[in-house]
Amino acid sequence: NGNWGGWGGWGSCNRNCGGGTRSRSRSCNNPSPAGSGSGCSGSSSQSSSCNTHSCAVHGNWGGWGSWASCTRSCGSGTKTRYRSCNNPAPSNGGNQCSGSSSHSTSCNTHSCPIHGGWSSWGSYGSCSKTCASGTKTRSRSCNNPAPQHGGNSCSGSSSSSASCNTHSCPIHGGWSSWGSYGSCSRTCGGGSKSRSRSCTNPTPQHGGNSCSGSGTSSTSCNTHNCPINGAWGSWGSWGTCTVTCGGGSQQRSRACDSPAPQYGGSQCPSSSTSTQACNTHHCPIDGQWGNWGAWGSCTVTCGGGTQDRSRQCTNPAPQYGGANCAGSGSSRQDCNTHHCPIDGAWGGWGSWGSCTVTCGGGIQNRVRSCDSPAPQYGGAACPSFSSSTQSCNTHNCPIDGAWGSWASWGTCSLTCGGGTQDRSRTCTNPAPQYGGANCPNSATSRQDCNTQNCPIDGAWSSWGAWGTCTVTCGGGTQVKTRSCTNPTPQYGGAICTGADSATQDCNTQVCIIDGAWGAWGAWGSCTVTCDGGQKSRARICDDPAPANGGLPCSGNSGEFDDCNTQSCPTVPPGQYQQLCPAGWFTCESGAMTCIQEVFKCDCSRECDDGSDETEGYAGCSASLLLACGGASGLVQTTILAVVCLICAILINAQGFIPT
């Protein structure tokens, strides 16, 4: 059988970036298949991905966005618009877009109206009254600022009045008449009572003076002694307890002297003595033995044993710390000390005597003595007999075996191709017994059977090598085959089961698809209406789009053509000057005369005479022009410039005025 040699080296990658493929091969020569040997299995070639890093994409500006709102509604503000470096965006190490991503211009330059504003209020003048509410006045001017440019005049009044000295004029206070005396502060022992008057005749107001003197007057009352009720003094100490344990009592006493009753006061309530329980803990009780219990059973019925009795420490039991019973709670004594009777027991059997016959069953005898021990103290004699008889030589006398008849032949060991079958006989006529001789010769016999040829079922050979894949990429199939010759079916044998071919997927790696241009779009509007302008159209690389590392479309995505080449109508004699608005650049000559300032010196040549990319006229730096390297021919930038120029021409269609 063939076997693969080693793989060869990898070939060159078919792409420098964006994902390519490389391959290597091997030969079926280690060894080559010979004779009826099978070819090598598997593929002779192998592919792998290479240079899978993405290709560099240089950035290019997208279109300008709309203008943002002006930063001011008047008085000169600015507005800005932006563009993004996304047409395409730089990636994989590509260059960023050159130039600025934003463009600003002035807006709302007209003066803002100034509305009039009041100056600060002047100081108030003198009050018209010193009390009881007067008025004072102040004023202001509309000059902070004065209204200008159509601004509104100040709203509101130029003067303001306020109340002043609103306090009432002062009224001095005067006393009312004395009132009646109130209740005495005590019912005995000397108290006081008072009367009052108020400063309400009239009440002082608005800063007037209060009344002079006191508003109250006091005098003594109920000066006789008060009765004093008796009150108990502190309790004395507790007396000695009547007992030392088991619960007694003790007393204490007090005197009615804090204070003693006087001037008809009442005696102290309740008792002058108090009693409480004491030494309530239990008294200790020493334990005492109860009566002895009856003697227990003797440990033996004869020959001397022991028996026990016990008593409990419960008469009474020890309590509350009392002492336990003294002495032991148990007692032991001897019992049944008389001799025990000894029963007789047999000694060992003697040897068996000779058998009466040599086979077929005889008898033999043996004897023993009652001396192990002999019976004493009324003990029983040995039971049973002193002699014993048994059978001997009970084996049958030997019988020699003889063969029975042969049984039928058994099943053949094979159904074809020559087998064998057996038959047997048994040594049972009679069977050998009791040591008799076995039957002579063999118990089995064998003969040939089913000697016809057997059918041979077919079997598959080894699979052949895989065939060529139906495609080189994108997923195809390949086939391998085998034959029913290992072995070929014979003598009615079954043919091979299963398929004689197999299919598998191959070259499943994605196909590299190079891009191709779609159809051109419609022509855009002409840049001018007469004297020759340009129009443009574009196409997209999508028929198909490049995929899986395929090459992009070659050539330009846009193209230009002349349009409106007819002469413009003759204008009146005189010189004309292109008036470009603020933020726009005036081309030196040619059909395109106004471009936005932001497109000047950006390597894109928006002016058809190229004056926007010059050092002398546009003021571009020599180093920038050298870096541009003729980039004015870049198609994508030019398309963007043409769109902007069309907008400029439309905006300035009325910008030509005779000088």
Image (spheres, grey):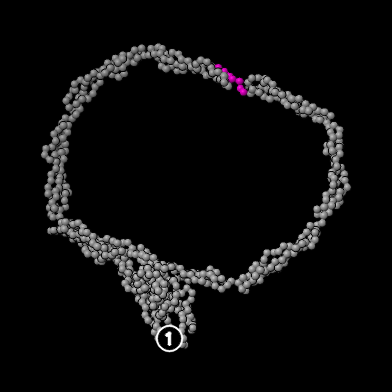
Give the residue drawn at x 64%, y 68%: 145
User: At numbered mark 1, what does the secondary structure look like: helix, strand or loop?
Assistant: loop
Closer-to-camera residue (306/30): 30
Q: Position of residue 468 (x, y in %)?
A: 22, 64
Closer-to-camera residue (587/537): 587
Q: Mark 1 Cα within 10 Å, few/some/many (few <14, many 20+)?
A: few
Give the residue drawn at x 57%, y 19%: 322
What's drawn in magenta, residue-wise?
281-288
Is residue 487 at least partly visible in the picture? no
Give the residue drawn at x 83%, y 49%: 210
**652 sits to left or right of 240:** left
Q: Amino acid at mark 1?
A: Cys
As displayed, is residue 651 above or below residue 168? Answer: below
Helix, strand or loop for the magenta stretch, by majority:
loop
Q: Quadrant of the N terminus?
A: bottom left
Is residue 277 at least partly visible in the picture? yes
Q: Is residue 446 magenta?
A: no
Q: Position of residue 603 (x, y in %)?
A: 38, 71
Q: Is residue 287 magenta?
A: yes
As displayed, is residue 365 above or below residue 521? Answer: above
Label 1: which residue? Answer: 568
Among the 4 quarters of the image, the one containing residue 265: top right
As displayed, is residue 388 above or below residue 23? Answer: above
Give the residue drawn at x 43%, y 15%: 306
**438 sits to left or right of 130:** left
